[in-house]
Image (cartoon, helix red, strand yellow):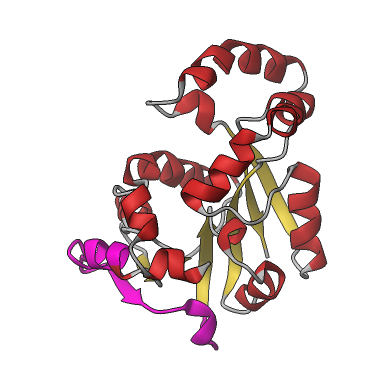
Amino acid sequence: MREMYEGDEYARKNPTWHEEDASWKANHVGRILTDNRVKFTTICEVGCGTGEILLNLEKQFPDASLSGYEIAPYAFNLAKQKETVKTKFYLDDISNLQPMDYDILLAIDVIEHVEEYISFIKCLKSIAKYKIFHIPLDLSVQSIVRSWPIMKLRADVGHLHYFYKDSALATLKSCGYKIISYRYTASRLELPNQARSSNIMRLPRRLMFSLHSDLAVRVLGGYSIMVLAE
């Protein structure tokens, strides 16, 4: 599936490369770092897209040096135009560049796109002390019953692997990671321009989540998980 990103298919289907979600994702990254009092001076991101997550993090952490790695020429060219003194971008596969020594590595909505995702996750372990994964929880009762949401994710944005909370955490643990902290993120509730079906489900998701978060996510979906690991 690399050809989807290295060619023009992904850009044709997703011309903004999801830039509009970047500040929301960066805020969640900043919050998990701050809440866990993680000390760092360097951050890298694998699959950085157009660079907007890192550029938003630069504003939150102006003393840090940030590096973004991207295999898609379309996204990289957009990111390269926005480089700053503190934030640099590279058209390269970070898994080919070891050994490296960053404090923090970000893999934000990445592993579900990678064919050999287990070996990919394992190779990221040595690149930085701390890793932050953001993983969409595509598997829920409603998504399986309806079927088409998962198939649409596969066709439109190239999701090859599908997770729920327990399988996502188990995958990281089996790859040798120690889980420090994790939290749900609610893209279907918090991001604008959602589909009509997501808007209809907004209130039920909020109400059920307030009563039993794990059950709400497993039954109704609409959430991702952000994990801080080492």
User: How far across and down, in percent of the image, does residue 153 sit?
Assistant: 55, 44
- From the viewer's perspective, tell me whether residue 214 is left or right of residue 18: right
Closer-to-camera residue (189/12) = 12
At a point 74% along the width and 42% down the height, the residue shown is 164
Q: Vertically, is 5 above or below 211?
A: below
At a point 39% along the width and 26% down the height, the residue shown is 192
Closer-to-camera residue (145/90) = 145
Per the image, is 90 magenta?
Answer: yes
Closer-to-camera residue (172/128) = 172
User: How far across and down, in percent of the image, does residue 211 sit?
Assistant: 75, 15
- From the viewer's perspective, tell me whether residue 178 is left or right of residue 33: right
**Residues in magenta, as a range:** 74-101
Residue 25 visible from this viewpoint: yes
User: How far across and down, in percent of the image, does residue 169 sit?
Assistant: 76, 52
Residue 42 visible from this viewpoint: no
At a point 61% along the width and 74% down the height, the residue shown is 124
The picture quadrant where one finds residue 95 is bottom right
Q: Vertically, is 98 above or below 51?
A: below
User: How far across and down, in percent of the image, does residue 109 sit?
Assistant: 53, 53
Closer-to-camera residue (38/46) = 46
- From the viewer's perspective, tell me whether residue 91 is left or right of residue 85: right
Per the image, is 2 magenta?
Answer: no
- From the viewer's perspective, tell me whether residue 106 is left or right of residue 137: left
